[in-house]
Image (tube, grey):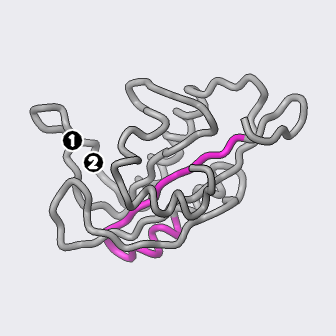
């Protein structure tokens, strides 16, 4: 854990990837960050520049705007990383729905994810030094190192990632 808050709380860095390729892409990212600030109960500590990229994993004429945002959460000492991670995941999914994302993830016959255009996508990249591997959530994000649109903004706001 980075930086102690007090004897009964820890500071934990949370890195989220945001992407949008439908509608007002910049506003979608800004609105998602505003809602995250409210729902996570703290303003972001750092946010990367916005970058425009081609879709990853599917074909579309609509380019993405991407960013990474970092929050510093104060969590009770001895917190359950999986339980906290799943609560954060639900916050992210709820914000995606509020901003117009519909449907559920689709998979092909091999079990690979089918990607499509979307007004907003929020992924948990890193959650402190925690490793989470359950059906709903994998942290660190299992595909982040394959995605330059994630790694470039992540490197911009974190010197040690």
Residue on which the image places disc 2 = 103
From what the image shows, is residue 92 above or below residue 65?
above
Which residue is painted at 28% across and 72% down in the image? Answer: 63
**Which dot marks residue 36?**
none
CA gap, disc 2 and disc 1: 9 Å
Crowdedness near tag 1: few (<14), some (14–19) or many (≥20) residues, C-alpha within 10 Å: few
Residue on which the image places disc 1 = 106
Are circles 2 and 1 on residues that touch, CB within 8 Å? Answer: yes
Nearer-the-camera pick, 102 or 48: 48
Which residue is painted at 50% across and 40% down in the image? Answer: 90
Determine whether, in the image, residue 151 is placed left or right of residue 160: left
From what the image shows, is residue 66 above or below residue 7?
below
| Quarter of the image that includes the N terminus | top right
Residue 132 position, x and y percent, is 50, 28
From what the image shows, is residue 24 above or below residue 136?
below
User: Mark 1 falls on what kind of element?
Assistant: strand
Nearer-the-camera pick, 159 or 65: 159
Which residue is painted at 40% across and 47% down in the image? Answer: 144
Asked if residue 17 lies in the magenta stretch, the reply is yes
Which residue is painted at 39% across and 77% down in the image? Answer: 24
Residue 111 position, x and y percent, is 18, 32
Nearer-the-camera pick, 160 or 8: 160
Determine whether, in the image, residue 159 is placed left or right of residue 139: right
Q: Which residues are magenta?
A: 12-31
Residue lying at the far right of the rendered structure: 7
Q: Nearer the viewer, mark 2 or mark 1?
A: 1
């Amino acid at each position: 854990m980075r930086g102690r808050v007090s004897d009964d709380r820890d500071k934990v860095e949370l890195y989220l990837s945001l992407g949008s390729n439908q509608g007002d892409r910049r506003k979608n990212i800004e609105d998602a960050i505003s809602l995250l600030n409210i729902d996570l109960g703290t303003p972001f500590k750092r946010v990367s520049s916005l970058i425009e990229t081609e879709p990853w994993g599917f074909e579309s004429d609509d380019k993405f705007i991407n960013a990474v945002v970092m929050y510093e959460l104060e969590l009770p000492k001895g917190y359950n990383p999986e339980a906290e991670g799943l609560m954060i995941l639900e916050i992210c999914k709820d914000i995606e729905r509020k901003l117009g994302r519909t449907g559920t993830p689709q998979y092909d016959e091999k079990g690979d994810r089918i990607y499509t255009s979307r007004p907003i996508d929020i992924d948990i990249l890193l959650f402190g030094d925690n490793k989470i591997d359950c059906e709903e959530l994998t942290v660190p994000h299992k595909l982040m190192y394959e995605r330059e649109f994630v790694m470039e903004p992540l490197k911009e706001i974190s010197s040690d990632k």
